[in-house]
Image (spheres, rainbow, N blue to C red):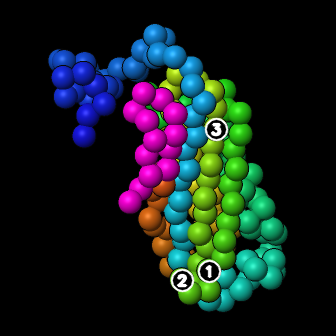
Amino acid sequence: MSDGPAGRLSHVTPDGTARMVDVGGKPETARMARATGRIIMTRATLEAIVGNTLAKGDVLGVARVAGIMAAKRTAELIPLCHPLPLTDVRVEFVTDSALPGVRVEAVVRTVGRTGVEMEALAGATIALLTVYDMTKAMDKSMVINDIALAEKTGGAGGPYARP
């Protein structure tokens, strides 16, 4: 898939050199991205999270803050991302006994020249990694998966919704 002119990836020059995309000429627009994911665990681990009985404390509360922090620091983690002034970051969890596990949704907003997809994905991912970190003493078999961009709005590319 290509974002660049003439079928090229936007972060790669014609000679194959990685580069940061110049977004200076793009108009500022309201942008939003929503990313989702999940962590599957034992039923006992899920019950400990829901009951808030783990020694490290409020797992989902700490994971929410970690996801927000990750979204804010994405440009420090992913080399070619632009630092963006985020206007809103929301990280929400739903416990799901059918998995058993926890589902996450990270929604990030800005008004800018480039999108916030990476910030939403980073927020969802780090939130789930924090759940793992806080519960690994109880369950090292947890699996983090299905991290994906669910939706985005704004920008020249227009809206996207995962089918």
Quadrant (top left/top right/bottom left/bottom right) for the N terminus: top left
Quadrant of the snapshot with the C terminus? bottom left
Percent of width and height locating residue 136: 62, 73
The answer, for residue 13, to whether it is visible in the render is yes
Q: Where residue 43 sits: x, y (%)?
A: 62, 89
Q: Point out the frontmost of discs 1 and 3.
A: 3
Count every numbered label the image shows and give the total: 3
Residue that mark 2 sits on: 99
Q: Of the two numbered discs 1 and 3 on the same chain, state the one appearing first in sequence.
A: 1
Q: What element does badge 1 sit on?
A: strand
What residue occupies the far top of the structure in this picture? 25
Q: Do tag 2 and tag 1 residues touch (Cβ < 8 Å)?
A: yes
Look at the image and say whether residue 9 sits in the magenta stretch. no
**Residue at the (73%, 77%) spot, across then down:** 49
User: Badge 3 local density, few (<14 within 10 Å), some, or many (20+)?
Assistant: many
Q: Which residue is under mark 1?
A: 96
Q: Decide if residue 41 is in sight here.
A: no
Amino acid of disc 2: Leu
- Pointer 3 residue: 109
Question: Disc 1 marks which amino acid?
Answer: Asp
> What segment is highlighted magenta in the picture?
151-163
Q: Nearer the viewer, residue 130 or 67?
A: 67
Cβ–Cβ under 8 Å for marks 1 and 3: no
Secondary element under disc 2, as helix, strand or loop, is: loop
Residue 129 vs 13, above or below: the answer is below
Task: Depth check: give the residue in front, 44 or 105.
Answer: 105
Magenta residues: mostly which secondary structure? loop
Check if residue 157 falls in the magenta segment: yes
> Residue at horizontal 66%, vertical 51%?
67
For the residues marked 3 and 2, what is the alpha-carbon distance in whole angstroms?
A: 29 Å
